[in-house]
Image (cartoon, grey):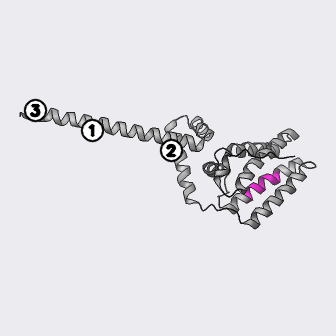
Amino acid sequence: MPVWSWFFIAAGALIALTLILAAVLAAKSRRRTRRLKEHFGPEYERVVDDTGDRRAAENELVARERNREQLDVVPLSPEAHHRYAQQWLEVQRSFVDEPSEAVGFADRLVTEVMRERGYPVNDFDQRAADISVDHPETVEHYRAAHTLYLAQEKADIDTEAQRQAFVHYRALFDQLLATEPAIENQTPKEATA
């Protein structure tokens, strides 16, 4: 067999191998996308919109998962669970007379629970990113509540906006007090404020 025919055979094998490798990588990418969409739900789309690039968004979500794996997030002890539940009832009752103070206290209480569970609490964006891994459906409640809290700190917001902030905080609070992230798919209770 002439040398040039070996060249064509080798080139054909290389092309076939390249096509197989491309198909395997494409399938792996589709599986990763599907897994991230299923896990993060609406948070997946939010990150894609924020980054403007699906690949960059997926890299960010995977980085969040890796960062979360490094954290030692633990369930609350029964005593801490009871203490925080009682504190929530107190702040909920205070909402009627002092809604702005209740919203501020709800923000601090959620942060305290996060700290005790093992989440870093120094930076809001990092807190939201960490929470999004365990509670992807609830993280948007946290962002909405925090946005309203910050608006309240800068100026007066109406009682309805304060009530909405409180309801959003309650959704995350309920998830943080739960011992298993699987509870995420349940409908959060609304505050009776």
Mark identifier at residue 59: 2
Q: Is residue 12 above or below residue 97?
A: above
| Tag 2: amino acid | Asn
30 in the magenta segment: no
Point out the residue furthest to the left here: 1
Mark identifier at residue 17: 1
For residue 61, say whether it is visible: yes
Mark identifier at residue 4: 3
Q: Secondary structure at mark 3?
A: helix
Q: Is residue 156 left or right of residue 12?
A: right
| Tag 3: amino acid | Trp
> In front: 68, or 147?
68
> In front: 44, or 103?
44
> In front: 70, or 83?
83
At a point 77% along the width and 52% down the height, the residue shown is 107
Characterize the local packing of mark 3: few (<14), some (14-19) or many (20 or more) Cα atoms within 10 angstroms.
few
At a point 64% along the width and 51% down the height, the residue shown is 182
Q: Secondary structure at mark 1?
A: helix
Q: Is residue 19 above or below residue 146?
A: above
The answer to the question of whether label 3 and label 1 lie on touching residues, with beta carbons closer than 8 A, is no
> Could you tell me how many numbered marks the image carries?
3
Cα gap from disc 1 to disc 2, whole angstroms: 27 Å
Expressed as whole percent of the image width and height from the top left, the position of residue 39 reads: 57, 44
At a point 16% along the width and 32% down the height, the residue shown is 8
Expressed as whole percent of the image width and height from the top left, the position of residue 91 reads: 86, 54
The N terminus lies in which quarter of the figure? top left
Q: Which residues are magenta?
A: 104-112
Expressed as whole percent of the image width and height from the top left, the position of residue 7 reads: 14, 35
| Tag 1: amino acid | Leu
The answer to the question of whether label 3 and label 2 lie on touching residues, with beta carbons closer than 8 A, is no
Cα gap from disc 3 to disc 2, whole angstroms: 44 Å
